[in-house]
């Protein structure tokens, strides 16, 4: 592998520009065409709308809130008390230069809803409270609401559009302003805009990760097992680059998989033109299934928890898994050369697929967890075994084949996601453009009035 002496520390992007002091004003959580809940703000002093979803996870709120799969969503925690162990440092890195405690550099959820928030925290890794973090990241948060009633509504009606309003009364006439993230290509917003590389000093294989919103622990799970990783933008034509790698990995990410037609097309070309091992997780599973010819469906309220049982249909063993998705693969549409790999024992939805003869498989759940159980972490070993087997086979066919990245390129290529814009920064830019447009209109009206 590349022989660079060390990994350059990953550089954090500029902090969100909508940072505010923590707000403690009256706030409302409004579900469109549903109930209105009054509470107290503890995050940023700003309003937001998005898709309201819930998680039953008991711990791991820093990891959940920084998971790019939650982009554009208002996350409701069913755990009664959130924030008691604070928020760890965003500057901490592990031995690979990856974020130690977060799944991406910034808070990804559009908003946070809890029954009760701990203003005072206690943990040896904590550097700030949940409220301080949300305010610094420009994300509104509300506490003092009946999350049991919210979850009951969402389970009966399905995931719904909602809004957090700080310091204002609810206005039914503003319902039309609800933002529906389903109509947006969220992957485009969270994917790196240029390649970046994580070097494994003692690794023996080189894996290409198609970054649809990859979690840090997915990268860590690969690098810690001996793979150097190059992350590519979601719309990269991986079929043209596969010969430079020993394996291809499709990451998790947010939103409707059908928005990523470019990625699906490139994956279809990859499977048609190469025998390279492929693994996908979460959205990566859905995109791989679409590329194979299957279809996806939207679940009523999704699966977001750390304790969901998934049955391995090849062994008959049950694994407790960590999950975060609102869409699923329709297993009845899988093509003949694929078979169902895992099935959800709660709702019987598809949790994975595997090719009958080639080293291609994917899972809907998260084997890397963070947080959650590590029952299925062995799947990374399974994948990398096939990657090494493929590399050995290719070395016999092409004795001079070398997939290692050169030391020079390893040193100069970025070690961090490039050009990824936070939701709050994007909102700031949009509001700035709207303000400029308003000023231009006012100036035009003033000129017209004096003419």
Image (cartoon, rainbow, N blue to C red):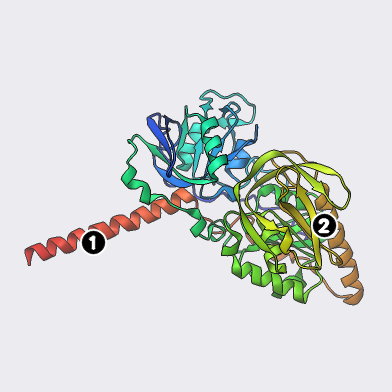
Q: Secondary structure at mark 2?
A: helix
| 199 relative to 120, above or below | below
The Cα–Cα distance between marks 1 and 2, rounded to whole angstroms, is: 56 Å
Indicate the position of residue 338 as horizontal and vertical percent values.
80, 64
Identify the residue under disc 1.
Answer: 440
* Residue 132 locus on image (x, y percent): 48, 33
Which residue matches tag 2? 383
| Position of the N terminus by quadrant | bottom right
The quadrant in which residue 238 appears is bottom right
Q: Nearer the viewer, residue 370 or 169?
A: 169
Q: Is residue 400 above or below residue 306?
A: below
Label 2 crowd bin: few (<14), some (14–19), many (20+), radius 10 Å: many
SS class of the residue under badge 1? Answer: helix
Q: Is 233 on the left or on the right of 52, as rendered?
A: right
Image quadrant of residue 412?
Answer: bottom right
Image quarter (top left, top right, bottom left or bottom right) of the C terminus: bottom left
Q: Are marks 1 and 2 in contact (CB under 8 Å)?
A: no
* Image-based side of 96 in relation to 127, left or right: right
In the image, is 240 to the left or to the right of 274? Answer: left
- Please, is residue 117 above or below residue 68 in the view? above
Where on the picture, by quarter, is residue 192?
bottom right
Q: Residue at x 76, y 55 (%)?
A: 352
- Residue 90: image x %, image y %? 58, 41
Give the residue drawn at x 60%, y 56%: 417
Residue 136 seen: yes
């Amino acid at each position: 592998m590349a022989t660079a002496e060390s990994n350059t520390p990953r550089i954090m992007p500029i902090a969100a520009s909508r940072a505010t002091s923590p707000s403690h004003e009256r706030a409302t959580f409004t579900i469109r065409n549903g109930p209105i809940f009054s509470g107290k703000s503890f995050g940023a002093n700003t309003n937001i709308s998005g898709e309201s979803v819930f998680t039953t996870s008991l711990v791991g709120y820093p990891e959940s809130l920084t998971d790019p799969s939650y982009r554009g969503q208002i996350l409701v925690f069913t755990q009664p008390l959130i924030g008691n162990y604070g928020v760890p440092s965003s500057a901490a890195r592990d031995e690979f230069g990856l974020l130690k405690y977060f799944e991406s550099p910034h808070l990804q959820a559009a908003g946070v809803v809890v029954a009760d928030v701990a203003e005072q925290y206690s943990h040896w890794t904590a550097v700030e409270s949940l409220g301080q973090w949300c305010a610094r990241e420009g994300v509104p948060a509300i506490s003092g609401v009946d999350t049991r009633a919210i979850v009951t509504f969402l389970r009966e009606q399905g995931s719904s559009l909602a809004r957090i309003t700080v310091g204002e009364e609810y206005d039914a006439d503003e319902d039309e302003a609800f933002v529906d993230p389903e109509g947006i290509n969220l992957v485009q917003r969270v994917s790196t805009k240029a390649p970046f590389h994580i070097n494994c000093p003692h690794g023996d294989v080189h894996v290409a990760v198609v970054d649809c919103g990859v979690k840090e622990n997915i990268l860590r799970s690969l690098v810690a097992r001996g793979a150097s990783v190059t992350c590519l933008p979601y719309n990269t034509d991986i079929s043209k680059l596969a010969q430079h790698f020993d394996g291809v990995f499709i990451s998790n990410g947010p939103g409707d998989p059908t928005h990523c037609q470019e990625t699906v097309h490139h994956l279809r070309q990859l499977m048609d033109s190469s025998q390279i091992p492929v693994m996908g997780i979460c959205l990566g599973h859905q995109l791989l299934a679409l590329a194979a010819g299957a279809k996806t469906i939207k679940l009523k309220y999704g699966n977001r928890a750390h304790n969901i049982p998934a049955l391995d249909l090849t062994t008959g063993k049950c694994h407790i898994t960590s999950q975060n998705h609102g869409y699923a693969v329709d297993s009845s549409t899988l093509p003949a050369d694929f078979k169902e790999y895992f099935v959800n024992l709660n709702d019987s939805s598809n949790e994975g697929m595997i090719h009958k003869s080639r080293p291609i498989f994917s899972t809907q759940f998260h084997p890397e967890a963070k947080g959650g159980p590590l029952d299925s972490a062995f799947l990374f070993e399974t994948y990398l075994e096939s990657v090494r087997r493929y590399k050995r086979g290719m070395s016999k066919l092409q004795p001079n084949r070398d997939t290692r990245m050169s030391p020079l390129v390893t040193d100069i290529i970025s070690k961090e996601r490039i050009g990824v814009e936070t939701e709050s920064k994007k909102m700031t830019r949009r509001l700035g453009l709207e303000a400029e447009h308003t000023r231009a209109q006012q100036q035009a009206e003033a000129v017209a009035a004096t003419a």
